[in-house]
Image: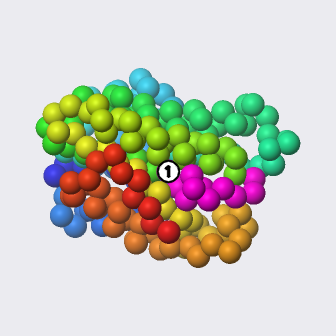
Amino acid sequence: MKIAVFGASGTLGRAVVERLGQHHDIVTVGRNSGDYRADLTDIASVRAALAKIGPLDALIATAGQLHFGTLAETTPEQFQIGLNDKLLGQVNLVLVGQHVLNDGGSITLTSGIVSDEPIRYGSNATTVNAALDGFVSAAALELPRGLRINVVSPNVVVESWEGYGPYFAGYEPVPAARVALAYQRSVEGIQTGRVLRVW
């Protein structure tokens, strides 16, 4: 399969590329690195990258920024970070990407554990991740040509624990390589409209 991974240089992206690259043709896409460049918040750059890449069997998004901070001190502009980047960025990829996928192709997005388990300072993250979970469940009902869509909802990963650990007191981090298995299941399996939790 020919698979494009958006956010391939990040912690999860690298694990996904390593896992799926063993059996598939991987195209890496990133804001500042990769085989192709694209900013998911810029629909024109997403369209341009996908036009250059050409027909695909699978699309994966592991990219997206969020805002962490107290609700009392969060500004509307800060809250927009997650909405514009992680949420609408991945939605943009679906809206454009569905048209470059071969029949029976798949799309895999990324949400996170705080969809179901909110944390302190994480109102933006919970909002965005829960919206992605809901979007996937609805989009799966409408995609044509046998296309499938799922979202991977990982716990905080071991490799990011140093930076994010303080937000996740009492949580047990999971290795990125274990999370990558869920992306493999989404691409190579038959599920659609599913939230694939790795907690």
Q: Which residues are magenta?
A: 111-121
Q: Residue at x 57, y 33 (%)?
A: 84
**Residue 23 falls left or right of residue 64:** left
SS state under label 1: loop
Position above or below: 173 against 164: below
Amino acid under disc 1: Ser
The quarter of the displayed image where residue 47 is located? top left
Circle 1 is placed at which residue position? 111
**Residue 131 falls left or right of residue 149:** right
Q: Residue at x 50, y 69 (%)?
A: 199
Q: How is the image coloured?
A: rainbow
Q: Nearer the viewer, residue 28 or 75?
A: 75
Position in image of residue 7 (x %, y %):
44, 49
**Residue 184 falls left or right of residue 12:** left
Whether residue 184 is visible, yes or no, is yes
Residue neighbourhood size for the residue with mark 1, other residues' Cα within 10 Å, grouped as few (<14), some (14–19), many (≥20)? many
Whether residue 33 is visible, yes or no, is no
Position in image of residue 188 (x %, y %):
21, 58
Position above or below: 136 against 92: below
Q: Nearer the viewer, residue 72 or 84?
A: 72
The quarter of the displayed image where residue 144 is located? top left
Position in image of residue 46 (x %, y %):
39, 31
